[in-house]
Amino acid sequence: MSKPLIYALFGPTGVGKTAVALALADRLRARGEDPVAVSADAMQIYAGLELLTGAPSESERAALEHRLVSIVDVAQTFSAGRYAELAHAEIDSLLVAGRRPIVIGGTGLYLRAALADLDLLPPPREGVREHLSGELAAGGAEALHARLAQAAPRAAAGVAPTDGRRIVRALEVLESGELDRRSEISHETGQRGASQLWSEELRVPTLLVGLTMARQALYARIDERVEEMLRAGAAEQVHRASAAGASQTAVKALGFKELLEGDVEAMKRHTRQYARRQLTWMRKLARITVIDVTGRDTSDVAAEILDCAGR
């Protein structure tokens, strides 16, 4: 592999990706480089949900410049396709300026969208999702599924008649003109045809590092992190976002629904479950270097990352 131009850090929530990125940035600066972090997190994109999403703090952003954090109003919908455009522009401009991008992500699709050229489906036109959601609430999922089956049988065959969210997404794509009777789409990734999520083809030479941790240590850290979020005011932030009309994509942030309902234990449980899924994604990522950070100093982890890159 060519010497990497980008360092990319992936790992489950709570594993310490930001802390490792800060340590890596320190070592890069020591050898004369100018690193910048580029977030690849689907929820840290939102302004107004920083505590809930674990976005880098002011002190962390002062220690390392972060791009694509808190740039979208919580009332706006957002898509992986739009993220890919922004991420490519940020990364390319950094490389042209001679700076070193450190892509940091826990969302598999956003990480791949930052690093590769994916054939992502477009975001819905303004108002389409809201209109379809109204129809879903009024007539139920099965009625919408019947409409999808009439217009695009192959797409409908891959969606359960009771899965309102995916039916709405398929109809959004249909109304955009991107889905016809012969098309197949992945409703989980929002991509055409077979999933490209784990493709080895990257836009720029990249060292992809997966951070992992002993399972029980990770779960303990997740539980403590949730408690820290609550002490910092995450529940109040969620209620403000909800009152401000949080979009259908923003409310998918892990813990949003749980904190609205005051169910902290459910938030901890669902976060642990999500971490397990992230670890499953990690095992599927092509050409990934996995580093166990259990009980290790972040500076040592950063040194290992540079060793893997051939310094």
Image (cartoon, rainbow, N blue to C red):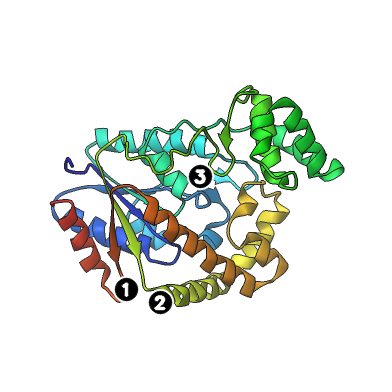
- The Cα atoms of the two marked residues, 2 and 1, are separated by 8 Å
For residue 125, say whether it is visible. no
Q: Residues within 10 Å of mark 3 (few under 14, many from 20)?
A: few
Q: Which residue is mark 2?
A: 217
Q: Earlier in the sequence, mark 3 or mark 2?
A: 3
Q: Which residue is mark 1?
A: 294
The three-letter amino acid code for the residue at tag 1 is Thr
The residue shown at (45%, 36%) is 84
Q: Residues within 10 Å of mark 1 (few under 14, many from 20)?
A: some
Instruction: Pick out the residue farthest to the right.
Output: 138
Q: Is residue 55 above or below residue 214?
A: above
- The Cα atoms of the two marked residues, 3 and 2, are separated by 32 Å
Q: Which residue is mark 3?
A: 71
- Residue 309 picture location, percent across and down: 18, 51
The image quadrant of residue 85 is: top left
Local secondary structure at mark 1:
loop
